[in-house]
Amino acid sequence: MKRAALGLLTSAVVLASCLQKESPVEYNDRIVARMDGAIQAISGLEATFELAEPEKMDSAYRELIISLTESLQGVDSIGLFGEDSLLNAAAESSLKGHLEVAQELYPEYIALLKAPDSLFTSEQQTLAFQLKEQIDTKNAEVLQSFKKAQLAYGQAYKIVFEE
């Protein structure tokens, strides 16, 4: 009986040592993949503004909301790196910041851009510029905050990130 228990314990120890844990780099890559999907959706929406394609703005906006929501769920499902919450919390905070911009600033900005030129007043033009500045500033701030946390994570695990 003792031999069977010892054999079972030995097998469990060998099996556990064979299972490879996720490396800090692999964890970072999974978090970044979730972030990239959201950033690409932001870029897709921004492209409709730059190309003055009002007919594509609504669908690009919906895709952005879906992408941000899925990215948040994805980051949540990844969980912590062991006991370390730094990168996960930074990604979650960044995605929530982008979602806040998407829900609070983009709708009014899109409505202004879609307005017919004949109804577009100088006040609306000023408001559109102000909204765009707020959007760009907030998106840059939350992304920069994530990058700062990612660098701290990298230092903690001796990871060198490519520029």
Image (tube, rainbow, N blue to C red):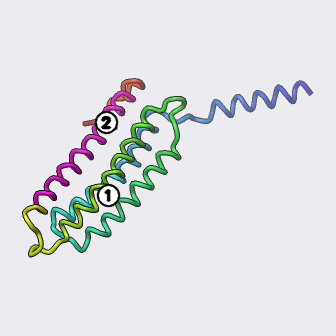
Residue positioned 92% across, 28% down in the render? 1
Q: Which residue is mark 2?
A: 145
In the image: residue 111, left or right of residue 6: left
Question: Which residue of the protein is positioned furthest toward the right in this rendering?
Answer: 1
Q: Amino acid at mark 2?
A: Ser
Question: Which residue of the protein is positioned furthest toward the left in this rendering?
Answer: 122
Q: Which residue is mark 1?
A: 41
In the image: residue 141, left or right of residue 27: left
Dot 2: element: helix
Would you say residue 148 sits in the magenta stretch?
yes
Q: Residues within 10 Å of mark 2 (few under 14, many from 20)?
A: some
User: Of helix, strand and loop, which mostly describes the magenta segment?
Assistant: helix
The quarter holding residue 147 reads top left
Q: Amino acid at mark 1?
A: Ala
Assign the C terminus to one quadrant of the image.
top left
In the image: residue 162, left or right of residue 70: left
Q: Which residues are magenta?
A: 125-153
Residue positioned 23% across, 67% down in the render? 111
Dot 1: element: helix
Between marks 1 and 2, how big is the CA–CA gap? 19 Å
Q: Earlier in the sequence, mark 1 or mark 2?
A: 1
Q: Is residue 72 above or below residue 55?
A: above
Front residue of 110/90: it is 110
Residue positioned 73% across, 32% down in the render? 12
Residue positioned 11% across, 57% down in the render? 126
The quarter holding residue 91 reads top left
- Where residue 23 appears, as percent x and y from the top left, is 48, 33
